[in-house]
Structures are given as C-alpha cells and as structure tokens.
Amino acid sequence: EVEIRRGAGGYVCGEETTLLNTLEGYRREPRLKPPFPTEAGLNAKPTVINNPETLASLPYILKNGASVFKAIGTEADA
C-alpha cells in the first residue's frame, strides 16, 4: 500500500522525522533516533519515506539497468 501525503510546510534540511511530525500535527522539528522511521514512523508504525523523484526513476532503472541510468547524469552525480 502506498499513500501520498502533503506535510504542513517545508521540513528541516530534508530530515524525514521532521516531515513525520508535521504529518502528525506536531512542531517542525526532528525526532530523536532511534527508533528510526522504518521501526516507528508515522503514527508509531513502520514507515518508509522516499523522494517522488526517486520513485519516478525506478521504472527506467528497472527496464534499462543502473549503469544506463548512471550514464545520464554528470560526473558530479556519480
């Protein structure tokens, strides 16, 4: 099951637990770790957080292979 949700605003430097706090209605600040989101994330349930750009790249990578995908970027991306 995949659920797409919008947070309450920007989150601190991409820190995933800050995003979880905004989704749960708390202040935009990071949580102490451990536990990590994969153990106790959104509503204390195991949660995986990914960037939409990463997920959108998966079909291309699976179809063409990681080496082909890597060749698209610049040397700085490698």
Image (cartoon, rainbow, N blue to C red):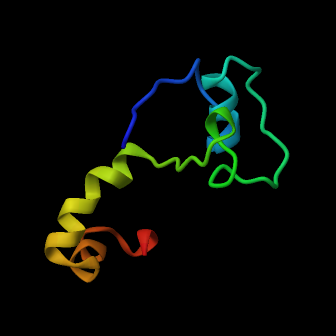
Q: Quadrant of residue 77?
A: bottom left
Looking at the image, which is closer to me, 27 or 68? Answer: 27
What residue is shown at x 62% (from left), y 36% (from top)? 42
Residue 55 pos. (x, y %): 33, 52
What residue is shown at x 31% (from left), y 68% (from top)? 73
Q: Is residue 11 left or right of residue 66?
A: right
Q: How many marks?
A: 0
Residue 45 pos. (x, y %): 63, 42
Quarter of the figure that contains the C terminus: bottom left
Residue 46 pos. (x, y %): 60, 49
Looking at the image, which is closer to me, 43 or 26? Answer: 43
Quarter of the figure that contains the N terminus: top left
Residue 62 in the image: above or below residue 40: below
Q: Is residue 70 left or right of residue 31?
A: left
What residue is shown at x 60% (from left), y 24% (from top)? 23
Residue 63 in the image: above or below residue 31: below
Residue 57 in the image: above or below residue 13: below
Residue 56 pos. (x, y %): 27, 50
- Residue lying furthest bottom in this view? 67
Q: Quadrant of residue 67?
A: bottom left
- Residue lying furthest left in this view? 63
